[in-house]
Image (spheres, helix red, strand yellow):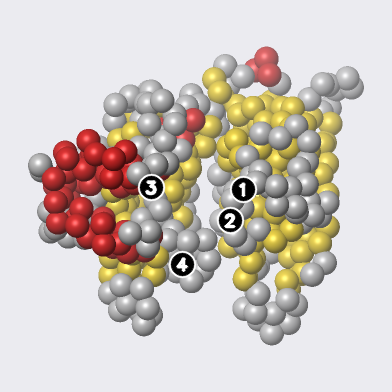
């Protein structure tokens, strides 16, 4: 594999400008035949306010993402001490954010030459700077090596012109289960903690995705899509979502394979995401966190008829098997989604004895 990376700050038209008018990143990798992998690269990003991104990449990449990290210098090991050669692009197929201190997503695209993630109206900007992490998902299904070319451009504005700080919604549903030869739905709800205005949205699924819809509470969908590639991005002049509402979205799948499909980063797995630019920034809303910003607040809506108490028994039998736990939760009745989701969130984040730590949630579910 041959790689190279270029970071360029393109200066503004006026001499003496303290901020670049654009930040440009370029990454080249040669992928060998039959390889599917994710690669990452740490880069230094100038302190700036960005208002729009544009991303181009040749065939072979499923997505390109750019994160802002919490590091002040490029790290040479993961947070747990595992050494990594970060002097060049490195394999991060175990998960781009796995083991690294990530602050937020700041740019990216899943469309080769189409719209990207970041697009704000006048006066709205996102603050970036420090150490960034580029992540690209490559697939070479051909018989010859594939030379890829990735370009990321961040358009900037003067800090004095920013009146509102924006952010990116990055809602990722980790519970997906599609049995062999069947159809299924992954349905998730995330809280909105303050009034926000959505500038654009898009979905993200893998090849078994056949339908997607997003709405606010029980209202009509504000975004629908039936494609997993060449995904359309919907822009809005003024889509306001009030504090206390929930962003409610689902992905429908058709699995023609002879095995069950679960959530995961590879094309052999599935994903269900709602992504979009919005303002003003609220990290809790961006990442489906609770009011304190400390943990998951997502509500999983099951597709079955199983009671809350019976689902508890299923979850106990599942033990530490995450796929089995997923099957239990998604087989529950929609009417117990709040209670079973509270138990699920507690079990997934418990640091001690889960039965003792999640006692109140378990009791509320059993009484439902």
Residue 228 showing in the rendered view: no
Q: Which mark is residue 301?
A: none
Q: Secondary structure at mark 1?
A: loop
Q: Secondary structure at mark 2?
A: loop
Q: Which residue appears farthest toward the bottom when viewing the image?
A: 143
Q: Are marks 2 and 4 in contact (CB under 8 Å)?
A: no
Q: Position of residue 76 (x, y in %)?
A: 78, 47
Position of residue 268 relative to residue 12, above or below, is: below
User: Which badge, 1 or 3, is on the more N-terminal residue?
Assistant: 1
Position of residue 231 relative to residue 182, above or below, is: above
The residue carrying mark 3 is 348
Would residue 186 be found to the left or right of residue 17 on screen? left
The residue carrying mark 1 is 99
Q: Position of residue 132 (x, y in %)?
A: 70, 40
**Image quadrant where residue 219 sits:** top left
Q: Secondary structure at mark 3?
A: helix
The residue carrying mark 4 is 269
The residue carrying mark 2 is 95
Q: Secondary structure at mark 4?
A: loop
User: Which badge, 2 or 3, is on the more N-terminal residue?
Assistant: 2
**Image quadrant where residue 153 sits:** top right
């Amino acid at each position: 594999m041959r790689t190279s990376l270029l970071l360029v700050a393109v200066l503004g038209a006026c001499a003496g400008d303290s901020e670049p008018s654009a930040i440009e990143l370029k990454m080249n990798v040669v992928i060998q035949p039959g390889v599917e992998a994710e690669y990452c690269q740490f880069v230094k990003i100038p302190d700036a306010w960005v208002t729009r991104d544009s991303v181009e990449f040749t065939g072979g990449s499923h997505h390109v993402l750019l994160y802002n990290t919490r590091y002040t210098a490029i790290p040479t090991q993961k947070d747990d001490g595992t050494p990594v050669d970060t002097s060049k692009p490195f394999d991060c197929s175990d998960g781009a954010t796995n083991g690294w201190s990530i602050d937020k997503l700041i740019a990216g695209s899943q469309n080769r030459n189409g719209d990207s993630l970041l697009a704000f109206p006048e006066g709205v900007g996102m603050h970036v700077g420090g150490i960034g992490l580029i992540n690209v998902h490559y697939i070479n299904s051909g018989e010859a090596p594939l030379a890829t070319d990735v370009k990321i451009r961040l358009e900037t504005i003067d800090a004095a012109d920013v009146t509102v700080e924006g952010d990116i919604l990055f809602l990722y549903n980790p519970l997906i289960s599609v049995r062999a030869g069947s159809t299924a739905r992954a349905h998730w709800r995330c809280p909105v903690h303050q009034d926000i205005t959505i500038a654009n949205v898009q979905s993200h699924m893998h090849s078994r995705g056949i339908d997607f819809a997003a709405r606010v509470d029980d209202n009509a969908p504000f975004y629908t899509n039936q494609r997993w590639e060449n995904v359309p991005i919907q822009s809005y002049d003024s889509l306001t979502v009030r504090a206390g509402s929930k962003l409610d979205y689902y992905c429908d799948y058709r699995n023609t394979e002879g095995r069950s499909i679960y959530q995961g980063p590879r094309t052999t797995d599935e994903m269900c995401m709602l992504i979009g630019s919005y303002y003003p920034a609220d990290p809790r809303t961006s990442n489906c966190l609770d009011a304190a910003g400390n943990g998951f607040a997502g509500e999983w809506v099951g597709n079955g008829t199983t009671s809350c108490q019976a689902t508890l028994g299923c979850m106990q039998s599942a033990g530490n098997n995450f796929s089995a736990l997923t099957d239990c939760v998604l087989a529950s009745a929609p009417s117990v989604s709040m209670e079973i989701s509270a138990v699920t969130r507690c079990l997934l984040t418990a640091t001690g004895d889960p039965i003792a730590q999640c006692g109140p949630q378990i009791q509320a579910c059993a009484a439902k």
